[in-house]
Image (cartoon, helix red, strand yellow):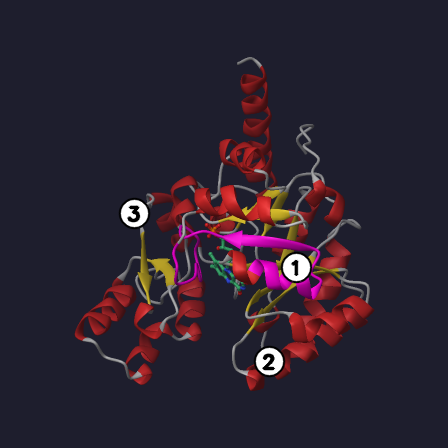
Amino acid sequence: MTPHKIGTRITDLFGIDHPLVCGGMMWLADADYVSAVARAGCIGFITPRSFPTPEDFREQVRKAHDLSDGKPFGVNLYISARPEANQQLQTFLDISIEEDVKFVETAGFSPKAFMPKIKDAGITVMHKCTTLRHATSAQNAGVDAIAILGAEAGGHPGMDMIGTMVQGAIVPRELDVPVVLAGGMGTGRQLMACLSLGADGMILATRMLVSEEIWAHVDYKKRLAELGPDGTKIIMSIFGDNSRVIDNDSTAAVLALEAEGVTDYEAYRPHVQGTLQKEAYEDGDWNKGTMSIGQSVAFAHGIEPAESIIDGIMAEAVAVREKLNGL
Ligand SMILES: Cc1cc2nc3c(=O)[nH]c(=O)nc-3n(C[C@H](O)[C@H](O)[C@H](O)COP(=O)(O)O)c2cc1C
């Protein structure tokens, strides 16, 4: 592991070596991945819905404990606007508590309803959101840290589409809890920019997709390595649910429906359903499925172990710190 260490409130909160937090990734953030990230000195979050049953999720948590050398890892809880969709989350939270998970990343809608159980269990929680308003209300609900997403992010960057640089200049200054910046991150230069803005760290997701420990097909990773910052598109704006995804045939089909003004979700389902994304990860046919990726795909230039990605980012950050010291 790199000897370079930068300590912030986030490294203290999570008990990690580097101020780098690897966001949950549906279908992909399993025990092998989060434990690789943990051993590299960062924290990652298992996505429970990625597994066929809650018991399979439990197995992943147990495996992550086995593989993480005692280093911290967490679980991602993506909260839906529909209460009925959140029933399963209670099961995932119960399993996390039973299996001695100490860290949770919540995202999507407000974590307020889950806070009593999370806090009673002594779990540290970071909530990920896209506006200062939601960040403030999550802080008031008792979360321990905020991840604020900018427009460049893969997945759900929100409807306001405020750039990460602007989020970074505003949100950390307005909150008391530690803040990590997310969206378009992938370099040590950006880590130092985050810290300069007053954040305590940054989130990596898209940058980590080309990790050797991510189980997706090598052809998919090779495609990511070819893409530049223009390799993504925003889809599903028509439903008020911006989603930043890979620019491919499925995405083009969705954009064509949006351009026609089609509002029947069933017309979109064949292109956007999660099982198609999973299939693409399995067989490497990157042209099908609306897989989440962000503009930081530009930094994912080759397949390498998670630890070497992290080490490269930290070495660059430390070099930047020395350069700035000399100004
Ligand atoms: C493939 C992929 C899957 C994702 N799945 C989830 C998820 O299940 N839950 C979640 O909270 N965020 C999810 N995200 C969002 C990331 O955790 C992170 O917030 C975001 O991607 C950060 O921006 P970046 O892509 O620029 O690194 C996903 C992102 C990607 C790239």
Q: Earlier in the sequence, mark 2 or mark 3?
A: 2
Q: Earlier in the sequence, mark 1 or mark 3?
A: 1
- Looking at the image, which residue sits at the far top? 326
Residue 78 location in percent, x, y?
Answer: 57, 69
- Amino acid bearing label 1: Gln
Residue 27 location in percent, x, y?
Answer: 52, 66
Was residue 167 drawn as part of the magenta stretch in this picture? Answer: no
Residue 8 location in percent, x, y?
Answer: 69, 38
Q: Is mark 1 within 8 Å of ligand 1?
A: no
Residue range of the region highlighted in magenta in the rendering: 135-161
Q: Earlier in the sequence, mark 1 or mark 2?
A: 2
Q: Residue at x 32, y 84 (%)?
A: 266
Q: Is mark 3 within 8 Å of ligand 1?
A: no
- Amino acid bearing label 2: Asn
Q: Which residue is mark 2?
A: 86
Is there a contact, CB below 8 Å, between mark 1 and mark 3?
A: no
Distance between the alpha carbons at the discs numbered 1 and 2: 21 Å
Choose between 28 and 94: the one closer to the eye: 94
- Looking at the image, which residue sits at the far front? 174
Q: Which residue is mark 3?
A: 230
Choose between 166 and 82: the one closer to the eye: 166
Q: Nearer the viewer, mark 1 or mark 3?
A: 1
Was residue 153 drawn as part of the magenta stretch in this picture? Answer: yes
Is there a contact, CB below 8 Å, between mark 2 and mark 3?
A: no
Q: Which residue is mark 1?
A: 139
Judged left or right of residue 308, residue 70 is: right
Q: Residue at x 64, y 41 (%)?
A: 19
Q: Nearer the viewer, mark 2 or mark 3?
A: 2
Q: Residue at x 69, y 79 (%)?
A: 91
Which mark, residue 80? none
Kind of element beneath mark 1 = helix
